[in-house]
Every structure is written in structure tokens, then in C-alpha cells.
Amino acid sequence: MLDSDTRCIHPLSDYQAEVVGYATLMASILSLLGASFMIVNYLVFSHGKGIFKLIIFLVIGDFFWALTEIIAFCLILFRPDSYTLTVCKTFRLLFQFFSSSTVFWTFSISVYLYRSISNIKSNRGAINFNFNELSPQKSTLLIYH
């Protein structure tokens, strides 16, 4: 069993880990700036309705994902002795949570857009879901929000 003072181990050489770390740091800083810009625009211009609310939840998840990466890399770079296995697992847990939330919110946005587009088409009569042949009650299935 590993002790809490055991260091986090990775399969890269020190140089490779440093290059990957700096590339991740630059991408995380750009992501953090973009997310901050979108959050400020949402707070100033949006009324918090519909898809904009879903997008802001996605942006908040991305913001904290980038922040987690920046803090983890800065901790590795400036305080490598304090980056123990417990700290490593904590950052990996946060990273996994925020990356999973990004997938969840992206899926929510796609479902919202699909339902919005299908509702527009069904209101125009372009899509008609008729299951009379399949249903014993001879009913029509209507999809509304």
C-alpha cells in the first residue's frame, strides 16, 4: 500500500513532462481567459434563458477545469516536494469531475438543440410521428416541449 508521502509517478522523462506541462499550461491559460470572457459577457448581456444558461454551465465547468490544471502544474513546477500522492489524486479527482461535467453539459446542449429544431419542424408539419400501424390503440404520438 502506498504511503501518503509517496510521490506521484508518471511514465515520462523529466524533460518530456516539462514540455507537456508547459503546453498544457498555455492551453489552460487560454481556456481560462476565454471562459472568463464568456462568463463576463453572460453576466452583462444575457438574461439567463434557454441555451445560454446551458452554455454558461459548460463554461463554468471549463473554467474550473483549466484552473485545476494551472494550479496543479504550478504546484509541480514551484513546489515539487509538496506534490505528494494525496495531492496528485485530489487534482486528478477534480480534473475527472470537471472533464465529465463538460461532457454532460455538451450532451445537454445537443439534446436541447435537437428538441428545439425538431419542435420547429413538427410545428411546420415537416415531421409527423404517426404510429397508428404500431400501436394497438391507433393513437398518434405527438412530441411537444
Image: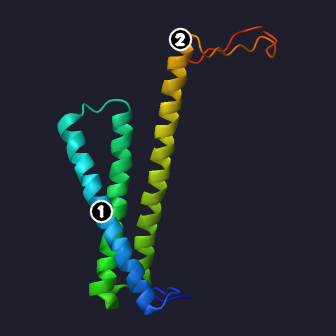
Label 1 vs 2, first from the N-terminus: 1
Q: Residue at x 42, y 91 (%)?
A: 14
Q: Which of these two is toward me, 30 or 93? A: 30
Looking at the picture, how far across and down is residue 123, in whole percent?
52, 12
Q: Relative to 67, is 14 above or below?
A: below
Q: Relative to 123, is 36 above or below?
A: below
Report the amino acid beneath label 2: Arg
Label drawn at residue 124 = 2
Q: Residue at x 67, y 16 (%)?
A: 129
Sort mark 2 into few (<14), some (14-19) or many (20+) by Cα contacts within 10 Å.
few
**Left or right of 87 on screen, residue 12:** right
**Left or right of 138 on screen, residue 14:** left
Q: Are marks 1 and 2 in contact (CB under 8 Å)?
A: no
Label drawn at residue 82 = none
Marks 1/2: CA distance? 42 Å
In terms of secondary structure, where does tag 2 sit? Answer: helix
In this view, the residue farthest toward the left is 44
- The answer to whether residue 106 of the structure is visible from this angle is yes
Residue under circle 1? 30
Report the amino acid beneath label 1: Leu
Q: Residue at x 41, y 65 (%)?
A: 94
Looking at the picture, how far across and down is residue 42, in whole percent?
24, 40
**Left or right of 127 on screen, residue 98:** left
Q: Quadrant of the N terminus?
A: bottom right
In terms of secondary structure, where does tag 1 sit? Answer: helix
- The answer to whether residue 84 of the structure is visible from this angle is no
Q: Residue at x 81, y 17 (%)?
A: 134
Looking at the picture, how far across and down is residue 58, in whole percent?
39, 48
Total labels: the figure holds 2
